[in-house]
Every structure is written in structure tokens, then in C-alpha cells.
Amino acid sequence: MAFNKKTHLRQNIDALKTAFTLDRERRAPTPEEERTLGAYSGFGAIKEVLENPTGKPNKDGMATLVAELHEVIRANTPDEREYKRYMDGIKNSVLTAFYTPPKVADAIVEAIWDTRIVPKRILDPSAGTGVFVSAVDFHDPYAEITCFEKDPATGLILKHLHPEKRVRVQGFERIEPKYAGYYDVAVSNIPFG
């Protein structure tokens, strides 16, 4: 099936609305909300988010959706600085947010477990929406997993998809020196954009 930017943008907006609602209401997602969050695919290849939608032609409906994205972020951030941080993260991800398919993450994690290595402390330095977290959980739901995700919007989704994990919405470069040698394994698919 071909990539449909409009569908992905709609799903991303719905997922962000859901995540902001969960934050505001301080609660876990319902199964339906989990599905909405799980449909989030990031903004890779959705170049329309790079420009201000005001005054843009709307023949394909993308300008309306981009305007809605701006409205959702603005309505759910406390100030201009935080709004800009979210929008900058979204814009910066256009070239890099292509998330690892679950089958690929499953195969990589399966290969780790096939070596008879049983990691208890796992680091995902670029977690996206947490496909590696889910793959590790299948093998050991009690493993201690720390996830880093630099993009604020994706980090918000990750936090609600995996509330039981340690999610840090910041770049991995911010990890403290005390964690050197702490983790048994690091597993991820780092964007090299």
C-alpha cells in the first residue's frame, strides 16, 4: 500500500490530541485510545508541516490539516516557547522520522535472546514510538527499559504507549555519566539524518 501523507497526518493529529488529553486528565489510555496512539507514524516525508499553512492553497486538504496540527499544539502547550519546541521537533523530524517496522525490531530482539543473553537493563537511545520496547517486553516484561526520544511530540506518544517504562523526552546525549556501564544492552534503530 502506498504512503498516504494525508492519512498519516490525520492519524498523527488524532494521536497527539489523545496524548494531550491523557496528560491533562492524568490517566492511562483506554484500549481505543491505545489504538489511536499506536497509529502515530511521525512526520517523516510530510514536508507540508515545514511551512505555515496560512494563505496556502488547500486543494488536497493538507493545509487544513497542518493548520489543525498547529492549533492542537498551540492549545496544549503552556506558552510560545513550548509550542515552538514541539513544532521545531516536528519540522526537524521530516527527514528522519521513519519508524522501524515491528517485524524488524522483533527479529533484532529475537536474535539477542537467541544468543542466550538475558539482559535485564536495556537502553533504547532513540525510541520513536517504542517498537523495540514492545519487542523486549515480549521476551521479558520485567526488564528495566530506559527510552530516550528527542522529539517532544513523539516522546509524548511514547510516554503514553509505554507508561510503565522510563521515558526521557530529550536527546540521548543528555544521559548522565553515572549510567556508563549500567545497561546490559542498547538496542535501537538510530536515525542518521
Image (spheres, rainbow, N blue to C red):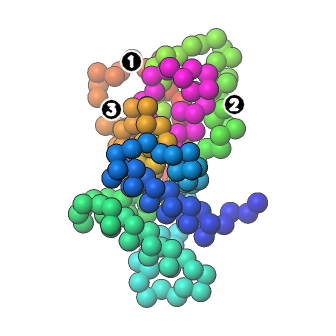
Q: Is residue 149 visible?
A: no
Residue 60 appears anywhere in the view = yes
Alpha carbon separation for disc pair 1 and 3:
11 Å
Coordinates of residue 32 in the picture (x, y in percent): 57, 50
Q: Residue at x 64, y 18 (%)?
A: 113
**Residue ID for mark 2:** 107
The residue indicated by pointer 3 is: 175
Query: Sequence-wise, which precedes: disc 2 or disc 3?
Result: 2
Q: Is residue 2 above or below residue 150?
A: below
Q: Secondary structure at mark 3?
A: loop
Residue drawn at (36%, 59%) of the image: 86
Which of pointers 2 and 1 lies earlier in the amino acid sequence?
2
- Classify 10 Å Cα crowding around label 1: few (below 14), some (14-19), many (20 and above): few
Taking 157 as reference, is 31 left or right?
Answer: right
Q: Position of residue 193 (x, y in %)?
A: 51, 52
Residue 179 drawn above or below residue 11: above
| Residue 147 among those drawn in magenta | yes
Q: CA distance from mark 2 to mark 1?
A: 24 Å
Marks 3 and 2: in contact by CB < 8 Å? no
Lateral position of residue 64 relative to residue 25, left or right: right
Residue 173 position, x and y percent, is 35, 37
Q: Which residues are magenta?
A: 129-151
Q: Against 112, is 55 above or below?
A: below
